[in-house]
Image: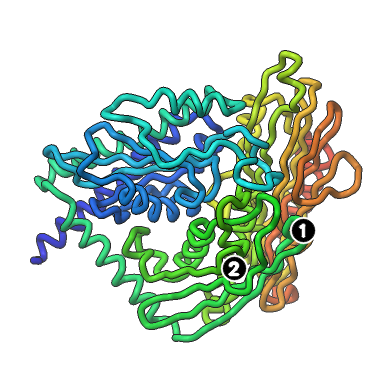
Amino acid sequence: MNLFSKTRQQVMWNRLLAVVEEQGQALIRAAFSPIVRECGDISAGIFDVQGRMMAQAVTGTPGHINTMAEAVKSLRDLFPIQTMQPGDIYLTNDPWIASGHLNDFLLLMPVFHDARVVGFTSCTSHLVDLGGLGMGPEGTDIFDEGLLVPPCKLLDRGEINQLLLDIVKANSREPIANEGDIYALIACCETGGRRLVEMMQEFAIDDLGELSDYIIDTSRRGTIDAIAEIPNGCWTNTLLVDGYEKEAELVACLTVEDHKIILDFTGTSPCSQKGINVPLNYATAYSVFALRCIIGSDIPNNAGSLDPFIVRAPKGCILNAQPPSPVAMRHTLGQMTPDLVYGCLRQVLPELVPAEGASCMYDLPMRSAPEIAQIGGEAFALEPAHNGGTGARPTKDGLSATAFPSGVWGSQVEITEASVPVMIKSRQLRPDSGGAGRYRGGLGQRIELQSANNQPFLVFLSVERIKNPARGCKGGKAGAPGRIRLDDGPDLPGKGEVRIEPGQTLIFETPGGGGYGPAHQRCRQAVSADIKEQLVSSATAQSDYDWKPNEDG
């Protein structure tokens, strides 16, 4: 391949990255659910005819993107290409194929050019409610958790499967939002397919084979070169997590070889009886994401850059749950795997790996109390997302109230209040919640909410770092643990269902990240900034956002 052709391939690769980003934005702009349109809980990607991911939208979460990369291969094997027609779109929310729990719908659309399939577009997004017990950890098997849709056709030659759509709506407390989100997913696939064909016409190519080989081979070589910079060896780490019935141990063994990295979860605790179990596809997605943040982080995410990472786990452990295990809140422990992996990687690359952070997304799934619909009220369901602080980095403080590793941005107060009858009384950073150190852990948040219409509602809790806060490293201190309570009552456990009566206030505090290095090494300027931040935060908290500086500041 001459220099010009390589340059041309690179231009097409860049164009493909622009196509998938437009594809992702189409989903966000059309979606009904706030967690999609406000928080970016999606994935979007383009795949070659073999089902290999060529490009993914930057907007999205690892739990959707990296699971989508494997799910497309599964769906492609289930539905022969020779049976596909223009306008066909396939759908599933099977947790062991798609992204780990029922609330995520994954779509696959074949892209036709000159009357033949040249590739696929795919996308995933979160639907706010699919019936069952709701988005909480209380289920005892997958059947408690809502409607499971096996791989099937959503569109047949452009015609919607109306029966399937009616079934999804009939099994939800938010039927209109579900219908809107499904059409948004369809629009996402169609946007990507249309732009892909336009790109092929512009560059006068009739298939994606050569471009796909270039993208995947280049990315694989770059990733292998990055792995080669790490000494071969084997490192282990254990992370104690809160669990549900009891604490659980997550165990990882990281093996670096010449051309690959193998991660093994042997020794991890068995599954819980409640819905915090994690299918291996989801545990793999976040574990590999964590590794790729450190190893070859400048290489685009695609089938080539993912290929050298292999993840294994014994069947039946909490990171490799088997059907019909309950998995609704699989992100609770699945998003703890980066800290688990970093504990291994820190032993060989200490100058690159941060301290532990809050990690688990602190979402607050809520829905109307069951009796509301019985008295003629309107049922609702919503899942606002919040975050704690990240761990301090080797050369910088941790980030406060930041979505790592999930990538799901925090829900806006105004959006929550406009969507459901819930009032957010306050939302602020937690002073001193980041672990002390030469570099301080990121701060968590304090959120207070109550009913806005004098009617009770339910909140489903499934969060971590209540009993086991984020650990500091290199002499840094642990971050503050999370804390949940009603008014001035006793602290509530991090898992379970809470009923909020009219007049009651749920106080929800997210954890801080661990510190890095001894606190006495912190520079004076940083200490002064900490003190100023503490004064401002305290004054803000005392006056419920009415505080303003006087003329003296």
Q: Nearer the viewer, residue 474 or 260?
A: 260
The correct choice, above or below, for 192 with respect to 248 in the image is: above
- Name the image quarter holding the N terminus: bottom left
What residue is shown at x 11% (from left), y 39% (from top)?
114
The residue indicated by pointer 2 is 393
What residue is shown at x 72% (from left), y 55% (from top)?
511
Check disc 1 and give the amino acid type. Answer: Pro
Label 1 crowd (10 A; few <14 / some 14-19 / many >=20): many
The correct choice, above or below, for 193 with respect to 225 in the image is: above
What residue is shown at x 73% (from left), y 29% (from top)?
423
The residue indicated by pointer 1 is 481
Q: Nearer the viewer, residue 319 or 480?
A: 319
Tag 2 secondary structure = loop
Q: Earlier in the sequence, mark 2 or mark 1?
A: 2
- The residues bearing labels 2 and 1 have C-alpha atoms spaced at a distance of 19 Å
Instruction: Kindly report which numbered mark, 2 or 1, lies closer to the viewer in this rendering.
Output: 1
Check disc 2 and give the amino acid type. Answer: Arg
Tag 1 secondary structure = loop
Coordinates of residue 447 in the picture (x, y in percent):
74, 41
